[in-house]
Amino acid sequence: TSLAPLKKRDLFNEWIKRSYYADMKWIVKTRRLRTSPEAFFPEAKSVITVVLQYAPIKESCEPEGDFWPWVARYARGKDYHRFFKKMLVKFAKSIEKRFQGVKCKVATDSAPVWETELAARSGIGWVGKNSLLIVPKMGSWVLIGEVFVSLEIEPDLPSVDMCGNCSMCIEECPTGAIVEPYLVDARKCISYWTIEHRGIIPENVRPTLGYWVFGCDECQEVCPFNRGKILESTNYQFALPKHLAQLSLEDVLLLDYKTFFSYFAGTPLMRAKFLGLKRNVAIAMGNRRDPFYLESLKEAVLRFEDDILAEHCIWALAKIGTPKGIKFLKDLFFSIKTSKMKRYIEKII
């Protein structure tokens, strides 16, 4: 497609005006680049959009247990930022080699580019009401990349929005984060809280996260374009590693940093960070209200001695709320060192 300004920039500006970006202030700072693709690479005259399908993976092991089913599908294997960009760079170099004097610049979702709009305008798919790109025969299980090219290329026709009157993604969003078609409020989004947010998750938000520990696929799972007959991906970089398939919530909560790093280095899960992922796990345990988790929650408080993790584990113990859980809370009151956590236990019980 061309590098003309994006037509839906008013929608993006409205999204910012309503503070739907939560505390992701870098998005506001790069507003101009996101709505004016010509500013990203001034030498460019065209942009080529590509997609990489990450699910469903052909002949891969399915997640089981209480951890992996609640990790977004794109995050169960390797971090696409690493290998996808290399693929794009290789593609860009082949263009520069074929067309002497032409220059290219690649972008993935870490770059300040409004990729879904460029993809829709280039005809590869359309933007669904959950703000995700939907590609024929692939659904929305795709990642988007761009190659900006200093070469005039005849634009393809833009895609037609095929969502029609369907509003399943809006209706099934567990937190009501899709406030209206094409507008998602990150302040309500499970993916935002479990991936991007650092520190304490407010108490009123914790129950809304359900069992999710990293990201959320709810709006995609219900989409008719993902439930019909779609192609299976052979991009096995996204497949769940067999040697990690048996990991449980309890395992992840009690991992030491060395083991955590050996398991998750080079995967999207590192984005949540060591204590952030454990925080999410503690919330999922509390929302499950299963007494099975009591011992590991208590142990995590004592082992890691971190106030933020401790608060979420203490909250989960109280949420489970059995007599044994209450006893553990009282035991912790006399075991932990910080007065802040002692006050939190007093408040919560």
Image: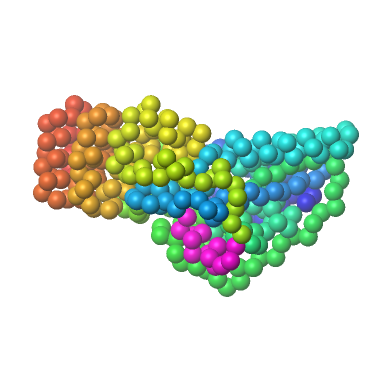
Q: Is residue 316 left or right of residue 211?
A: left
Residue situated in front as seen by the camera: 101 or 121: 101
Q: Is residue 221 magenta?
A: yes
* Position of the C terminus by quadrant: top left
User: Does 144 sit above or below residue 304?
Assistant: below
Residue situated in front as seen by the camera: 13 or 200: 200
Where is residue 155 drawn, in percent x and y? 81, 54
Residue shown at 14% from the left, 30% from the top: 335
Q: Which residues are magenta?
A: 216-230
Where is residue 264 drawn, in percent x and y? 45, 35
Examine the image and state in which quarter residue 269 appears. Answer: top left
Where is residue 307 drawn, in percent x and y? 28, 32
Residue 84 visible in the picture: yes
Residue situated in front as seen by the camera: 145 or 241: 241
Residue shown at 53% from the left, 39% from the top: 78
Q: Is residue 239 left or right of residue 92?
A: left
Examine the image and state in which quarter residue 86 appears. Answer: top right
User: Does 173 sit above or below residue 274?
Assistant: below
In the displayed orientation, state which residue is furthest to the bottom: 165
Where is residue 236 drawn, in percent x and y? 56, 45
Residue situated in front as seen by the camera: 245 or 205: 245
Residue shown at 38% from the left, 39% from the top: 277
Q: How is the image coloured?
A: rainbow
Tally the marks: 0
Residue shown at 87% from the left, 38% from the top: 99
